[in-house]
Image (cartoon, grey):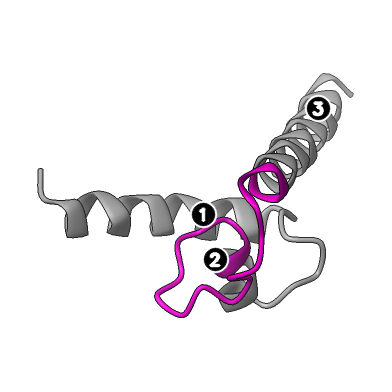
Amino acid sequence: MEQDEIKERFIQSAFIGWQMGAGSGKKFGEYLGEIGLSEKQAVAEATPEDRKLAAKAAIAKAEEILAMASNKDKA
């Protein structure tokens, strides 16, 4: 698989996560920059630690959304 194809798949996955609430109300392009998938790198000054924290926050948000969806299914 080519690098461009891999990146495109990551972007598609990020879009789904963004639609589910990851990104703290940011525009999709800003969110891509935050997680390091934007060509422009909107958050170029972000350190690797900043990106790790942002990724953890996105994962926590996704887990929260999944838990809420799971609770709705049980009701």
Name the kind of residue labelled 3 in the image.
Ala
Mark on residue 3?
none
Image quadrant assignment for residue 75: top right
Side (left or right) of 63 relative to 43: right
Q: Nearer the viewer, mark 1 or mark 3?
A: 1
What is the CA distance from the residue labelled 2 to the residue labelled 1? 7 Å
What is the CA distance from the residue labelled 2 to the residue labelled 3? 24 Å
Element at badge 1? helix
Residue 1 versus residue 19 in the image, above or below:
above
Residue drawn at (75%, 42%), measured in percent from left and top? 53
Residue drawn at (84%, 33%), measured in percent from left and top? 68
Image quadrant assignment for residue 65: top right
What is the CA distance from the residue labelled 1 to the residue labelled 3? 19 Å
Q: Nearer the viewer, residue 9 or 67?
A: 9
Q: Nearer the viewer, mark 2 or mark 3?
A: 2
The residue that mark 3 highlights is 67
Toward the top, the furthest residue is: 74
- In the rendered image, residue 42, in percent from the top left (x then y), is placed at 59, 77
- In the rendered image, residue 35, in percent from the top left (x then y), is placed at 57, 56
Name the kind of residue labelled 1 in the image.
Ala
Comes first in the chain, label 2 or label 3: 2
Element at badge 2? helix
Stretch of the chain drawn in magenta = 33-51
The residue that mark 1 highlights is 14
Comes first in the chain, label 2 or label 1: 1
The residue that mark 2 highlights is 32
Name the kind of residue labelled 2 in the image.
Leu
